[in-house]
Image: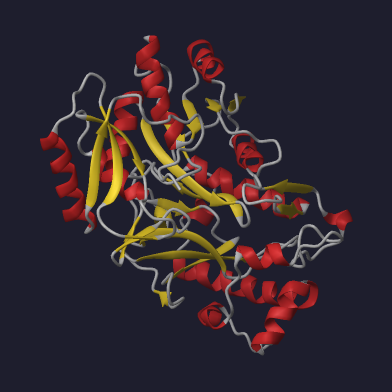
Amino acid sequence: MLAPEVETRPWAEQSVIDDAHYRNQLEYLHEHSAFYQKKFKAAGISAAGAGGLADIANLPFTAKSEIRASCTAENPIGSHLCVDRSEIMRIYSTSGTTGTPSYIPLTARDLDNWVTTSARSYSASGVEAGQRIVSTYNAGPFVAGAALAAFDKLGMCHVPVGTGNTERLMTAIRMLKPEAAVLTPSYAAYLIEWAAEKNFDLIGSSVRRVLVAGEPGGGEPAFRKKLEEGWGARVTEAMGIGDIGVSLWGECEYQQGMHLGGRGFIHAELIDPDSGASIAMEDGARGELVLTHLQHRAAPLLRFRTRDHVEVWTNPCKCGRTAPRIRCIGRTDDMLIVRGVNVFPSAIREVVSEFVPEVSGNILVKPAQPGVKQEPPLPIEVELAKGKAEDAGLAEAIRSKLRNVLVFTAGIKLVPYGSLHRSEYKSKLVQH
């Protein structure tokens, strides 16, 4: 445990500390953020009258689209920028898949908080100082760079390889013998198949901990089992969101959800994604994750809608950490609605993975209509395992299981092994 005095602090005590930070953050936004000055004025809210964390649900949400809309040629970061350019130490960016990249500035203090958060999250997995860890994330302009700095803070020997260098990665594993590897769940699954094709003894390698992040999936029981058996290693996951912080959550060895590594730096809420109503953070609760900065300076965000749908645990964990835990179910971006039922592709993959070794575990959802709303049966291609032939009984069993577990009707098409695209980064589960 990186910081026992913080990570084991009773949550009631943490909440009092967080409330004080939150009130200071609100004052800071009122004084320095043109973006929130405008939002507060429109909502008739003053810093003094906004109250504390107990009243946060009375404040407006922040959407990514609002921030994008506030960007100008003169201020490409957005009007939520609160500091002079001389105070900005680092500027990360998103991939810009929807157009112009979004820029994420950090002061020196912000960056240090990000690295501290990531170090707490990754240390939960059990990696230790002096061990070697090989990473496959591209740092460059992206926020993953801050997450990778966490390995330095933990005192580990870091071997960066980057994305799309499988031969280099496996050579590093064979020759340098790292105890841990960090990569996306999709890439971890791809490497199991690659190792089988190349007669690389992945199970017998030095890697005993696989840390996955970057997309949902690492915490799905069946998919996790596939990864652990293929690597001969313990698999734990981490999660963050670029606008707020990297690796905000990290799973411990008990694998019962990701602990909030960003405690003291962010406040987490749960809401109903349709109505926006608050949902209590308690065991078994599900909803959209909303995050608020508590000690940020460059471009703080208030009630930021992450579009991540999560399940929450607050019961005590055997590791001693007292922060709430979550597991990501899926993202709004990928969610489909089939006759009123919300369907997440990652949940489909989880059900299909229960049919391994008859299937490979790879799927592709192919909506028949454009848009989110779909009529049943929802077409899904399920890839057979290597050497397996098409089986009408298997297709029906998968369809029936999906119906019973996820309450929607699917049209299952079994396709030969190798038909579906593999990724050395993140997998696309939906063909839009």
The number of callouts visible is 0
**Residue at screen point 87% across, 56% down:** 85
**Residue at screen point 73% across, 52% down:** 103
Whether residue 110 appears in this view of the structure is yes
Q: Is residue 406 left or right of residue 36?
A: left
Q: Quadrant of residue 428?
A: top left
Residue in the foreground of this view, choosing between 13 and 185: 185
Measured along the vertical axis of the image, is residue 407 above or below residue 31? Answer: above
Q: Position of residue 426 (x, y in %)?
A: 49, 38
Measured along the vertical axis of the image, is residue 324 above or below residue 149? Answer: below
Q: Position of residue 9 (x, y in %)?
A: 48, 60
Q: Is residue 101 left or right of residue 408?
A: right
Q: Position of residue 32 (x, y in %)?
A: 79, 72
Whether residue 200 appears in this view of the structure is no
Residue in the foreground of this view, choosing between 207 and 218: 218
Measured along the vertical axis of the image, is residue 9 above or below residue 27? Answer: above
Q: Is residue 342 left or right of residue 35?
A: left
Q: Position of residue 145 (x, y in %)?
A: 66, 39
**Residue farthest to the front?**
369
**Residue at screen point 62% across, 47% down:** 97
